[in-house]
Amino acid sequence: MLFKAFVILAGLSVLCRWALGKWPWEVVRFAPGRRRAVNSARALLGVAPAAGREDIIAAHRRLTAQVHPDRGGSTTAMQEANAARDLLLAELTGAQAGPGE
């Protein structure tokens, strides 16, 4: 009985891979949500949830002064800092627009 269940499970896995192009465990894996990304961006820049545009830009400038490639930082760190700034500014303008607009 256990062998029969294993064969059926393996067959369903192969069928899922064939039909969707992904294994079943890849289909059910959850990608991090926007809220988690926003929280990570806030932590990277060191700003509070209520931070305004000026606070975000000032925190971004402080961080990029430390991680800029010309000052011994890396390109990856700069890209992460820029992505965090862009995400928080987009989140800020999205919150100002309101849910019904």
Image (cartoon, rainbow, N blue to C red):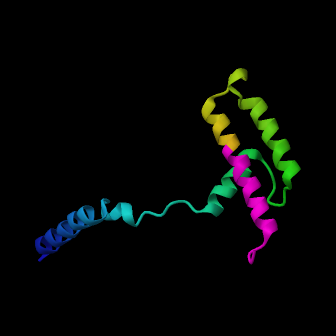
Would residue 94 appear left or right of 23 to someone viewing this image?
A: right
At a point 75% along the width and 45% down the height, the residue shown is: 45
Would residue 73 appear left or right of 17 to someone viewing this image?
A: right
At a point 88% along the width and 49% down the height, the residue shown is: 54
The answer to whether residue 73 is above or below residue 85 is above
Q: Position of residue 36 (x, y in %)?
A: 63, 60
User: Which residue sits furthest front?
Assistant: 101
Would residue 70 appear left or right of 33 to someone viewing this image?
A: right
Would residue 28 appear left or right of 8 to someone viewing this image?
A: right
* Numbered circles on residues, count: 0
Q: Quadrant of residue 2?
A: bottom left
Closer to the camera, 61 or 3? 61
| Residue 89, magenta (yes or no) | yes
At a point 75% along the width and 64% down the height, the residue shown is: 94
The answer to whether residue 71 is above or below residue 52 is above
Q: Position of residue 62 (x, y in %)?
A: 81, 36
Closer to the camera, 18 or 31? 18
Predominant SS along the magenta part: helix
Q: Position of residue 65 (x, y in %)?
A: 78, 30
At a point 71% along the width and 49% down the height, the residue shown is: 86
Q: Position of residue 46 (x, y in %)?
A: 78, 47
Q: Quadrant of residue 59?
A: top right
From the image, which quarter does the C terminus lie in? Answer: bottom right
**Residues in magenta?**
83-101
Closer to the camera, 48 or 56? 56
From the image, which quarter does the N terminus lie in? Answer: bottom left
